[in-house]
Image (cartoon, grey):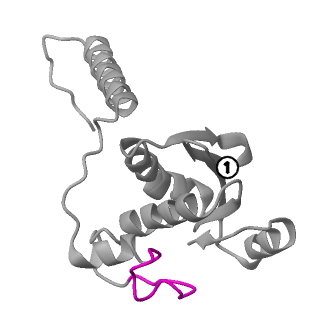
Amino acid sequence: MITLKNNSKSFDERISNLRNKVMQNAITLRKKIKNGTLFKFKPFSLKQKKILTWWTDKSPVKDKNGIIADGSIRAGKTLCMSLSFVLWAMTRFNGQNFILAGKTVGAFRRNVLFWLKLMLRAQGYKIKDRRADNMCEISKGEIINYFYIFGGKDERSQDLVQRNYCCRGIFR
């Protein structure tokens, strides 16, 4: 049997107060996102710098076809890899299609795209997230590219991509 303590505030009042706090936090978060003040870059490690610049003219690995990051959990691999992929795409191409993939579209949006959009906005990029199409239109100045979001949990997902999309690069 569960017993509740008799507090001075009623249950409904506590729920109402909690809802108000959540709404205030959401409003504050939205303002920070719009202002670009939510995401502040900290100095990158040497390994992260290598990932962020693999595609530049001075990089010794600029002609390679792919990059694999291996390391501990929460080391910043996904953050740097996704940012580097988009920076490469935006620097080298215009008007092209790219693929961003995760285990599921929902997991990718939650774990990668949310932070990627904050980082890109902090760098002056504009992002139009077209959720119905699972596509993000990313632009800066005259450059605009299209990033399609896919889940890749099974062979069916792979078949969908191979048959229906022509793209310049894939981030997985």
For the C terminus, the image quarter is: bottom right
Please indicate whether residue 9 sits to the left or right of residue 65 in the image: left
Q: Quadrant of residue 83?
A: bottom left
Name the spot of residue 141 as percent of width and height, x first: 55, 41
Name the spot of residue 24 as percent of width and height, x first: 30, 19
From the image, tell me which residue sits under label 1: 135
Q: Residue at x 67, y 49 (%)?
A: 135
Q: How many other residues sit within 10 Å of disc 1, few (<14), some (14-19) or many (≥20)?
A: some
Instruction: Classify 48 as above or below 110.
Output: below
Name the spot of residue 146 as percent of width and height, x first: 67, 52
Please indicate whether residue 54 sits to the left or right of residue 144 in the image: left
Q: Residue at x 58, y 86 (%)?
A: 65
Q: Residue at x 28, y 35 (%)?
A: 37
Q: Residue at x 46, y 57 (%)?
A: 112
For the N terminus, the image quarter is: top left
Name the spot of residue 4 as percent of width and height, x first: 21, 27
Task: Specify the segment rendered in magenta.
Answer: 55-69
Please indicate whether residue 96 sits to the left or right of residue 103 in the image: right
